[in-house]
Image (tube, rainbow, N blue to C red):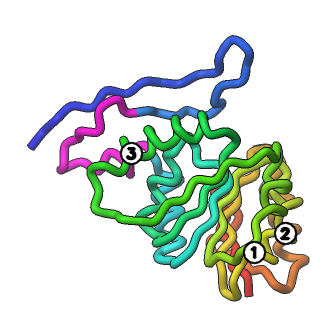
Amino acid sequence: MSKTITLKRIEKDENNTGTVKGYWRPWKCNFDHKLNRREIYDPAYTNLCKEIQQVESLLEIGSDLGRSTAWLTEVARNIDVYENTQDYIGFCKIQFNNFTKHTNHISNVVWHTTDSNTALAVLKTVNKRYDCIVLATEYVTDCVETCKTLLNPGGLLCVHDTRRLYHNVDLSEMIDSDKDLVSQNGVKKTFTVIKYK
């Protein structure tokens, strides 16, 4: 059964505040079932889900406009997502629903608004523990100590430092110097998965 899909590229706006990544938004979520469109367009999330496998609870700071959250429903039963404003969460939910309406993955996703403007500040407001934390931000190594206080033993920390030129070196040094952490998949250009002992 072959159907069509229409994609729209989202670029930076005139104030330079839009997304900086090549984000493809489907206006129609119909696709040829012989072709796994999501694995082709989202290899970073495909690989991340393979690394995580299955967890009970997951914390995500930022949702890539709802897209990464949709992927994470494949591996987590309960997801807490933190985003900036209620209006932005509304937009993310629309995108999330577009991505998940053709899957059978049922997760309990709770969207939280935050007044904090950095990932570290958001993490400091969280008061429960998780099996996995997914975090993409600048200076991600600054957040690791706080993340460790929020992870269950044996939990996974999935991090991507958006400062592309430096994150590999910083993450490698951090993992090597911390006896509580071990890299599960090596340091990657996208998401590095770190196991908390």
Identify the residue shown where x is 47% and y is 51%. Answer: 43
Helix, strand, or loop for circle 1?
helix
Callout count: 3
Question: Going from the N terminus, do you reach mark 3 or mark 1 first?
Answer: 3
Residue indicated by mark 1:
150
Instruction: Identify the residue at image location x=74%, y=80%.
Output: 182
Using residue 97 as the reference point, say whether residue 47 is left or right of it.
right
Which of the two discs, 3 and 2, labels the residue nearer the N terminus? Answer: 3
Q: CA distance from mark 2 to mark 1?
A: 7 Å
Q: Which residue is mark 2?
A: 146
Residues at marks 2 and 1 touching, judged by CB atoms closer than 8 Å:
yes
Dot 3: what SS? helix
Q: Amino acid at mark 1?
A: Leu
Determine the CA span between mark 3 and mark 1: 28 Å
Q: Which residues are magenta?
A: 26-41
Q: Residue at x 66, y 86 (%)?
A: 154
**Measured from the top left, where is residue 99 in percent x and y?**
38, 46
Left or right: 60 as drawn, with respect to 96: right
Magenta span has 36?
yes
Mark 1 neighbour density, 10 Å: few (under 14) some (14–19) many (20 or more):
many
Where residue 73 sits, quadrant-wise, is bottom left
Q: Which residue is mark 3?
A: 97
Query: Which kind of residue does numbered mark 3 sit on?
Result: Asn
The verdict on residue 105 being magenta is no
Look at label 2 and name its amino acid.
Thr
